Amino acid sequence: MRSRDQRPEVQKGKWECQIECCDFRKFLPTLHDVDLILCDPPYAREYLDLFEPLSKLAAECLAPRGMLAVLYGQSNLPELYDALRTHLDYRWTMAMAMPGDAPTVFHKRVRPQWKPLLIFMRPGAKPVRWIYSDLINPAKVAKDLHPWQQEEGGIRRAVELLSQPNDLVVDCFLGTGTTGVAALETGRRFAGCDVDRKAVLITRKRLGLV
């Protein structure tokens, strides 16, 4: 495995971005030495069975001190923690503030003002990079491309806190590519996938790949 200072610098025209239309269970096994997986998967209970495979594949493709960061709603947090801890060690929970009128969770009788960003690492890995703030305040709500779209400023801040320039950042629930935009604009390399062809096309356009 190459050390960080042996990796090629990100340069325009060289490999810096990979986008695929496929399931994450096919995509993550093609990657290695990933510094950060930052994703915003679907929150509904019916998708909870995705997270044990995500935990397993992340443990296999992350760099020795790489991290998995999952942005997730609060309704099913206990089950999510249990699934992700199957193959990874829990590090921390960051808070992503939700500006504007956040959706009300009627069955819990709660109007949330923040979302957890759950941080996990490979088993036995020791944190080296400081997380200098565990609170992120996005500037505004952005839903112009997709109902589940995340605000670019908040995701950019998460990328900056959890990785460094030239790192490989991955989003395996790509959506409209906000993580990819944030990664490339801050000098990271990026790889992402989604099963939704429309979402992949939007991402490719946002990243200037079509």
Image (cartoon, grey):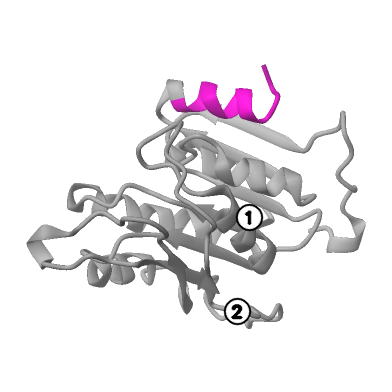
Give the quarter of the image for residue 121: bottom right
Q: Quadrant of the N terminus?
A: bottom right
Q: Nearer the viewer, residue 86 or 166?
A: 166
Q: Quadrant of the C terminus?
A: top right
Q: Which amino acid lies under the numbered mark 2 shown in the image of this protein? A: Ser
Give the quarter of the image for residue 197: top left
Q: Nearer the viewer, residue 136 or 27?
A: 136
Crowd class of label 2 (few under 14; some 14 to 19; many from 20; radius 10 Å): few
Q: How many marks?
A: 2
For the residue labelled by badge 2, is the local secondary structure a helix, a strand or a loop?
Answer: loop
Q: Which mark is residue 71?
A: none
Q: Which residues are magenta?
A: 199-210
Task: For marks 2 and 1, give the CA distance.
Answer: 14 Å
Q: Which amino acid lies under the numbered mark 1 shown in the image of this protein? A: Arg
Q: Is residue 79 magenta?
A: no
Q: Which residue is mark 1?
A: 156
